[in-house]
Amino acid sequence: MKYITFYLDFISPYSYLAFEKLPEALMGHSYSVTYKPILFAALLKHHGQLGPAEIAPKRDWTYRQVMWQAHHHGVDLQMPASHPFNPLELLRLAVACAASGQPNRYVCETLFKHVWLGGAEASDPQRLQALTQQLAPPRASHSDEVKSQLKAHTEEAIARGVFGVPTFEVDGKLFWGFDALPMLAAYLSGEPWFEGGWDAAASVAQGIKR
């Protein structure tokens, strides 16, 4: 069995697409998944990047491509009323739902669908209150313990080289993005390319720096 860590942020439509299609993509493989919510904005800050929604032409393309991907793959998805939004309440709620800070699939699914179905405001206070009542977390989402666990998840991701969401880690290898699911499945299948091609691809010299 392979053990996969799924780093995600509910603000990311690609995380939602990957979450929905993961069981199908890995069908027939022996694996378990640990879901770790992280703050995508902290990754961007650490790596000195803007998010795709912060660059106007890229923002338009990203939303069009996300909606086409959802259509193409048969995933029900509607953009929230506004995006990006502050996902901290959702991330902390997810962490609060498990003593380990690692929510189960039901919790993640409920939070993703809160954002990506219906076209409502993801951060609307009344909706967040109803969501909290539905999930009934055993810990307060604003507790210092929960905040510390979310921060620890994010710092762990950064330390392991994660730069975006969704990212899947298995055997120390990182697979980034919704479109990496076929590559992840190939690795789990034991495809020989990974024996040499993985490290060779990272050995290319950097010709110029800005």
Image (tube, rainbow, N blue to C red):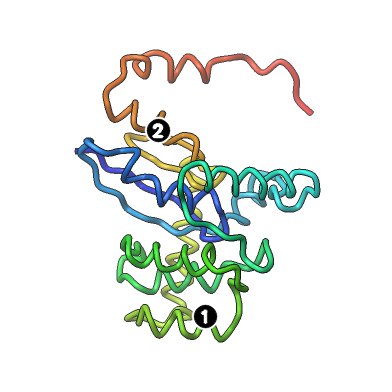
Of tags 1 and 2, the one toward the viewer is 1
**Residue 194: mark in rendering:** none
User: Which kind of residue does numbered mark 2 sit on?
Assistant: Lys
Residue 178 pos. (x, y %): 49, 41
Do the residues bearing badges 1 and 2 touch, measured as CB atoms within 8 Å?
Answer: no
Q: Is residue 129 left or right of residue 21?
A: right
- Please name the residue shown 69% across and 47% down the image: 52
> Whole-Å distance between the Cαs marked 1 and 2?
35 Å
User: Which kind of residue does numbered mark 1 sit on?
Assistant: Leu
- Please name the residue shown 40% across and 31% down the image: 182
Which residue has dot 1 on it? 128
Residue 197 pos. (x, y %): 43, 15
Residue 181 pos. (x, y %): 42, 36
- Please name the residue shown 67% across and 62% down the image: 83
Q: Decide which of 127, 158 is in the foreground and name it.
A: 127
The image quadrant where one finds the C terminus is top right
Q: Secondary structure at mark 1?
A: helix
Q: Is residue 53 left or right of residue 36?
A: right
Dot 1 or dot 2, earlier in sequence: 1
Residue 99 pos. (x, y %): 30, 71
The image quadrant where one finds the N terminus is top left
Q: Secondary structure at mark 2?
A: strand
Which residue has dot 2 on it? 173
Q: Residue 12 occupies which quadrant of the picture?
A: bottom right
Question: Tag count in the figure?
Answer: 2
Q: Residue 42 occupies which quadrant of the picture?
A: bottom right
Seen in the picture, residue 23 relative to 100 is either above or below; the reply is: above
Q: Residues within 10 Å of mark 1 (few under 14, many from 20)?
A: some
Seen in the picture, residue 21 relative to 38 is either above or below; the reply is: above
- Please name the residue shown 31% across and 15% down the image: 192
Seen in the picture, residue 120 relative to 63 is either above or below; the reply is: below
